[in-house]
Amino acid sequence: MDNLLFERELKNRTENAENVVMKYLPDPEEKLQHTVIEAMDYSVTVGGKRLRPLLMQETYRMFRGQDEIVEPFMAAIEMIHTYSLIHDDLPCMDNDTLRRGHETTWKKYGDAMAVLAGDGLLNYAYETALKSFDLIEKEGAQYEVSSETIASRYQSCAKAVTVLADKAGIWGMVGGQCLDVEAEKKDMVLSEEELLFIHEHKTAALIQACFMIGGVLAGAGRRQIERLEKIGYNVGVAFQIRDDMLDVIGTTEELGKNTGSDEKDGKKTYVTIHGLEESAAEEKRLTEEALELLDALPGKHDFMVELILSLLGRRN
């Protein structure tokens, strides 16, 4: 796929992912709890690459998934990702005031409402994911679908919700955030194993969920799901290493957030331990390995390959 074609496809598919996410956001009008809903919507709509829902949808398509069953999960993963950013930015955490070129949620609505907005998005994410069951019922009512097929689809959705919960919780993102916070507050000297634990859980876990859920919903086998999980690990850790690098070499204008905070806060990152050159080499190695793993999976990979490559050496 040439670069021009990829850019056009990326624009179209990102717009589609954006529309899916927007479709599932709650409406704040004429509700007594409108402020928290406004803060939730604000946090999701101020920007973002929609990388996670995009990866999920592309994996679903790669395994020949064609219907809308993946869409509630696409919205749910973006809600969970956004809630994690809201809480990351809080004064008690990273104390950031700028995100995606806009005021962070706590800066705009206050830290108490930001906590509630994050809580709201996390809970609403699961409400949204469970709407996939309604889509199965609707499909069964509209078309001649066997009871065995409907039961199988219910099982796939239930498994997808399990993956979502596992990768977002204490065995995934929250667990990684726990060690990250402790390391910073206690000025811990992290081992290589501990640093990779943070990267795997805090960042890669949700990206793993995207690949895995896309495969689960489309009927991928157990070994294929395991391969997708490994691809998600590589892409996620490479993504975090690049984020660590951008905190050093990036600008506020490019990133839409404050830079240099890792060094200022004494935070241990892949870059502070290994330096820029070795970090770039590891980012490249992980990306190339992910593409090798992807090559052994069925379906068309052209766009997915270009999407993963576009993350290598990114500037925002």
Image: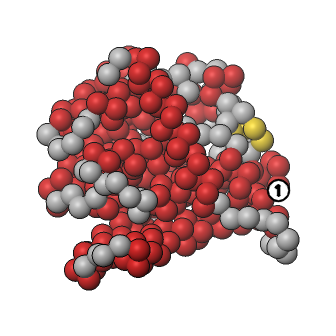
Q: Judge from the rendering whether residue 95 lies leftward or rightward of residue 171; answer left or right.
A: right
Residue 277 in sight here: yes
Q: Judge from the rendering whether residue 208 lies leftward or rightward of residue 203; answer left or right.
A: left
- In this view, the residue in front, 97 or 69, is 69
Residue at 65% over, 40% down: 47
Residue 18 versus residue 119 in the image, above or below: above
Location of mark 1 (residue): 110
Element under label 1?
Answer: loop
- In this view, the residue in front, 185 or 74, is 74
Residue at 70% over, 43% down: 46
- Residue 110 percent coordinates (x, y): 82, 56
Q: Residue furthest bottom?
A: 147
Residue at 82% over, 66% down: 29
Residue 59 versus residue 279 in the image, above or below: below
- Residue 71 percent coordinates (x, y): 47, 58
Neighbourhood count class around disc 1 (C-alpha, 10 Å): few under 14, some 14–19, many 20 upward: few
The colour scheme used to paint the residues is secondary structure
Residue 242 in sight here: no
- Residue 22 percent coordinates (x, y): 63, 53
Residue type indicated by callout 1: Gly
Q: Judge from the rendering whether residue 313 lies leftward or rightward of residue 35; answer left or right.
A: left
Q: Quadrant of residue 250?
A: top right
- In this view, the residue in front, 147 or 99, is 147
Location of the C terminus (image quadrant): top right
**How many numbered marks have been drawn onto this rendered protein structure?**
1
Q: Quadrant of residue 116?
A: bottom right
- In this view, the residue in front, 181 or 138, is 138
Residue at 67% over, 30% down: 256
- Residue 1 percent coordinates (x, y): 32, 22
